Amino acid sequence: MKQGHPGRGQVDLWYVPLDDFGADEQAACLRLLSPPERERHDAFKSESARLQHLAARGLIRTTLSGYRDIAPEHWRFGANRYGRPFIDDSLGIDDLHFSLSHTHGLVACAVAAIAEIGVDVEPRDRDAGLDELAAAVLSPRERLRFEAMNGQARRDFFFTSWTLKEAYVKARGMGLALPMKSVVLDLEALPPLAHFTDPIEDDPSRWAFRSLHLASGHIAGIATAVPGGKPEIVPRRTRAINPPARR
Ligand SMILES: CC(C)(COP(=O)(O)OP(=O)(O)OC[C@H]1O[C@@H](n2cnc3c(N)ncnc32)[C@H](O)[C@@H]1OP(=O)(O)O)[C@@H](O)C(=O)NCCC(=O)NCCS
């Protein structure tokens, strides 16, 4: 059954814990890849990066087919000059948009009716390298808060900040060409608020930020410039693809 159209304020957050991405799912996803996707798949040296890439292709193709009468293998994609993928114009679909993220153990995609949508996912349990990353990602004031924290609260503060900032730069379609330090978050506000510092020139009141803890042990950050500023986030766990029936 088609989901049809995500409502104007709705963001469907589809996610696949990679523990659920077994041999049947992998084989089914492989059959959906376009020749360039297959080439990229075959070139990965790291097994975990290869699996994330494969699950992401399967997830986005089968998910989009839930919204439109297009078979998973028939979706075509383009990318902007910063690498942001989008549904190819030749398919004539201008009211369905997505953002993809993958990390250790999880692949996620956010689907919405508006183009300015970004998602980022990260595991909540990582400790290694946080201080170096904080220096690169957090504004001076955010860093002071981070440095005063310990344990899981510290990790959650960092990964909530990071995923929301990354979701924003992805929603803008520019990725790391925008400095994450210039997205300054107030996480004490519920939902979180942001302002921007030089060189980002943008109106914070256009943006809504939402953070979710997923049962898989990951944090998902979503940024969207949804009209009205009140997105409804609908988390939807899936297996990326229906494995072929066993005979
Ligand atoms: C987009 C970016 C922030 C992703 O960060 P990440 O945490 O490594 O990876 P994630 O899994 O969360 O996201 C990767 C996905 O984001 C999407 N993506 C890539 N570039 C994007 C962009 N400019 N805007 C939005 N989404 C983008 C892709 O779908 C990609 O997955 P895919 O390659 O399997 O299709 C980062 O890789 C980036 O900016 N890349 C572009 C290169 C660039 O600008 N370099 C500047 C160096 S200073």
Image (cartoon, helix red, strand yellow):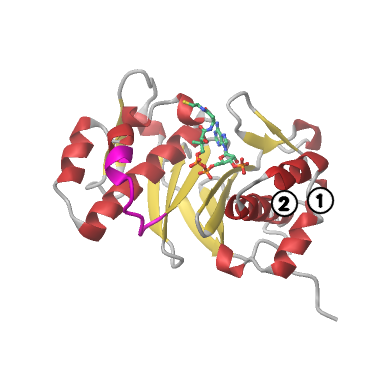
Residue extending farthest to the left is 148
Judged left or right of residue 54, residue 119 is left
Residue visible at 72% across and 51% down in the picture: 61
Three-letter amino acid code of the residue under disc 2 = Arg
Residue visible at 39% across and 24% down in the picture: 202
Return the x and y of residue 69 as percentages of the image width and height: 80, 52
As drawn, 197 above or below 233: above
The C terminus: image quadrant: bottom right
Q: Is residue 130 magenta?
A: yes
Three-letter amino acid code of the residue under disc 1 = Glu
Residue extending farthest to the right is 247
Q: Which residues are magenta?
A: 123-133
Judged left or right of residue 163, residue 96 is right
Rendered image quadrant of residue 212: bottom left
Q: Which residue is mark 1?
A: 73
Name the element at disc 1: helix
